[in-house]
Amino acid sequence: MSSLTIKDLSKTYANGLRALQQVSLDIPVGMFGLLGPNGAGKSTLMRTIATLQEADQGTITLGDLDVLDQKDEVRKRLGYLPQEFGLYPNLTAQDLLHHLAVLKGLTHRGQRREIVAALLEKTNLYTHRKKKLGGFSGGMKQRFGIAQALLANPDLIIVDEPTAGLDPAERNRFYDLLSELGENKIVILSTHIVEDVKELCTKMAILHQGRVLLQGNPLQSIAQIEGKIYSKIIRKEELDAYQNNYTLIANRLLQGKPIIHIYSESEPEGGFEAVKADLSDVYFSHIFGQLSLQQQRITSPQLTSCYPPSL
């Protein structure tokens, strides 16, 4: 299986929003994490790769296929789980999967029956195959989404924000399923949840305001900032001053008091404690490195909301 190569991809919407700005990525076989806050351009990039919208410029190739020109051929090798997808609530999982299989070209009844049963088993839904989809939990719906994405045994699988809203148990089941798929396929996981990438991916990129800020291996990226992350408990009224004087990359409350993480090339004064770097620190240091201090104050609540609790 060849890699997916994206070069200088750009997209500007009619309202002037520059969703993608010369995005270039090399995505090999395996799990690839695409991290970024809401509005970073992740969904635009995923829809473009999935042949659902056009780019203004740039190229995408999947092996020897031109993704932007050979859409029908790409769709035969693609499985896609969008951020939001509709289900027929009065159909059973088995019946809808059979229907979707026919649309995918699996017209031989015996072969289709075997494939549908295997996919329901793979996604741990076989015992619920006769249950109506309207009664499925959020995690079960997501697993059904993966089942339909796998109908044509695709080489490329795209999943957009798949674990948002799932409880920890369902998220772990989804982790296991995606990890298995990534052993011999290209699986692109688009998310704003850092833990998803940390748990699953050996390659990653950070996308922000339509630009790629970082591309590499998560563990290597963590090693590059090791020794540059510091923590301190402060008073609430001190937060603005610390934002003005340090590269503040995250904050949360500990017993009612803010505990902050800052990025610093050298040991800061003022009672900071060096802490072990994490992928969350990589993410936030790159995001905030592109923002003015005023923008940090505006966007910090959204970004820190996905910071893992074990700061």
Image: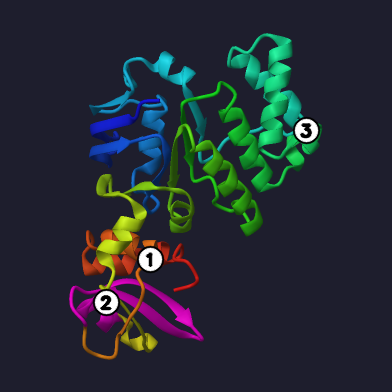
Q: Is residue 43 visible?
A: yes
Q: Which residue is mark 1?
A: 278
The residue at the point 33 percent across, 66 percent down is 298
Per the image, the residue denoted by label 3 is 129
Q: Amino acid at mark 2?
A: Gln
- Location of the N terminus by quadrant is top left
Residue type, numbered disc 1: Asp
Residue 44 at x, y percent in the picture: 37, 37
Q: What element does badge 2 sit on? A: helix
Q: Nearer the viewer, residue 274 or 288?
A: 274
**Residue shown at 57% from the left, 35% from the top:** 85
**Which segment is the magenta one?**
240-267
Query: In whole angstroms, how far apart are the C-alphas of marks 2 and 1?
Result: 21 Å
At label 3, which amino acid type do we have?
Answer: Arg
Mark 3 and mark 1: span between their CA atoms? 40 Å
Disc nearer the start of the sequence (2/1)? 2
Q: Which residue is mark 2?
A: 243
For the residues labelled 3 and 2, the Cα–Cα distance comes to 53 Å
CB atoms of marks 3 and 2 within 8 Å: no
In the rendered image, residue 81, in percent from the top left (x then y), is placed at: 53, 35
